[in-house]
Amino acid sequence: MRKFLIKQWLRKHDWFWETRTRIFAWYVGLTTMFIGLSIPIFTELTIIQVDLRVKEDLLEEIEAFEESFRDDTEEDIAIIFDRFLQYKIPGDKTFLIATINGQFYRSSPLSLPQAISPDSPLIKNVAQTKKPLRGKNLIPDSQVGDIIYQAEPVEIDGQVRGVLIVANIPQGERIEVLAAILVVIEVLLVAFILALIFAWRMVGKVLNPIRSLTKTAKTISETDLSQRIPVRGQGEMAELAKTFNKMMHRLETAFKTQQQFLNDASHELRTPITIVRGHLELLEYNDPQEIAETIPLVLDELDRMGRFVEELLLLAKAERRDFLILEEVDLSELTVKMYLKMQGLGERQWQLDSQGKGKVIIDRQRIIQAMMNLAHNALQYTTKPDTIALGSAIEKEHIHFWVRDTGIGIPPQDQERIFQRFARSSNSQNNTKGAGLGLSIVSAIVQSHNGRVELYSQLGKGSTFTIVLPKNTKLKNTKLM
Ligand SMILES: Nc1ncnc2c1ncn2[C@@H]1O[C@H](COP(=O)(O)OP(=O)(O)O)[C@@H](O)[C@H]1O
Ligand SMILES: [Mg+2]
């Protein structure tokens, strides 16, 4: 039940899932963790530092005592202690305590805190020592209170007569340190809050392009692909915006091409439909001769529509991954076969230029189809005495197939354009029955083989179309456009 409520709440408040909230939450979490860890570590280290200094002070007192006593020939331990303690003023919170034969003798200053008073267990204990001692004892009932002490036995004639104990209670110093740390914490807290405000704003600023990208993406409809995201600055976000814009450009182009294609295709289909309709409307049903004359005309138009639809389907298929069926093909045999097949197209001076030798990997049927399209065009733009030649060759890693004719040629300004769908050259408009898809089909087949088509043509002299393919075609991913 509870889990369900939380889920519902999260779903309703989708700001919780926003990248900004999440980055911010991480920031808060990490910073809190660092501060939370560093404060106790910092405190502990400072206290250790204070203790070290105290210990050094104690050592200094002991050394001072040893020095005063080293050159002394005095045999009486009480006098030795007296001389030292009389004029030795111990540092702040430091106590010098002298014991003789395990008993308290005197101290400086005179009054001692409870924890190191003559009757305290600590002093009674340490007074018995025969060796130098160092230690740290917790003062009961005190939060920061430790006693740090050092004890030095005094030997006279090889016998321990008394002990000098130097003790310090660094409580006051510790409290000072802790107060300073408290100030540090307060400053940190203010800085932390400021940092949070800045972080929230900065994250928002950094993520702004994403928000604007989403907004733009939302306003894009199928009919309006012209929207672009403003690119600001550099870095990943600008890169993202650029990539998005490029993608939009490609989509826009693809969409326009598709629109154009549909336009042209419908236009192309309307003509034969109009012709067929016209023939049938005017047909005299009782006149057998007219019927006999009309039927071939109508069938011819229907054939043309049929061919056109076939071509459209082929172009659509060429975009698919499984368009090609690759196989190993004997180049020489294929060339001869195509040569024989082309001769059936019509009466011309057919010629076989050359046949490449060797095995290649291509889609046999598609290549035959592309070459037949080229031969068909050659036939269309030549007359009987003209030559149409075909050939193949292997050059390094590439196969060349060509169809050469001595026909009307193609003007230079049209040589690139005619490979586009529905495009025809200006000098052949009325000469052709095709829809202008033949060369785009050749292009599609060649491109799916990772190859290219080259055209060499001179007006009035003829044209040569050359298909260049890699020797071993590998399947590639289909493109978007
Ligand atoms: N061998 C050629 N000689 C002259 N012009 C050609 C030749 N091949 C193609 N063309 C020109 O290229 C145009 C496009 O050819 P294609 O795509 O096959 O369409 P279609 O044959 O349906 O017109 C043709 O209309 C023609 O103008
Ligand atoms: Mg053609």
Image (cartoon, rainbow, N blue to C red):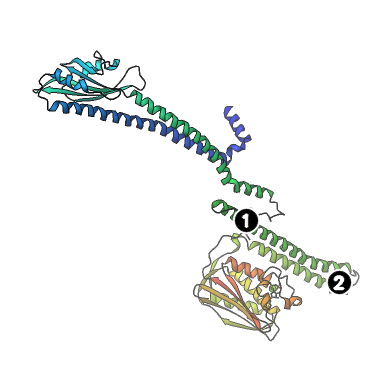
**Label 1 packing within 10 angstroms: few (<14), some (14-19), many (20+):** some
Q: Is residue 119 left or right of residue 239?
A: left
Query: Splitting the image into 4 quarters, where does residue 271 fall?
Result: bottom right
Give SS at disc 1. Answer: helix
Give the residue pinned by disc 1.
Answer: 245
Real-space Cα separation, disc 2 to disc 1, in angstroms: 60 Å
Give the residue pinned by disc 2.
Answer: 291
Residue placed furthest toward the bottom = 385
Instruction: Inspect the image, locate mark 2, and give the three-letter code of the amino acid beneath it.
Output: Ile
Residue placed furthest toward the top = 119
Quarter of the displayed picture in which ligand 1 can be seen:
bottom right
Image coordinates of residue 159 in percent, x first then y, are 10, 21
Image coordinates of residue 313 in percent, x first then y, are 68, 63
Q: Is residue 365 visible?
A: no
Is 89 drawn above or below residue 307 in the view shown? above
**Label 2 packing within 10 angstroms: few (<14), some (14-19), many (20+):** some
Instruction: Inspect the image, locate mark 1, and give the three-letter code of the amino acid beneath it.
Output: Asn
Image coordinates of residue 143 in percent, x first then y, are 37, 21
Residue at left 51%, top 36%? 28
Is 468 in front, or is 239?
Answer: 239
Residue at left 60%, top 54%? 231
**Label located before the other in sequence (2 or 1):** 1
Is 335 drawn above or below residue 60 in the view shown? below
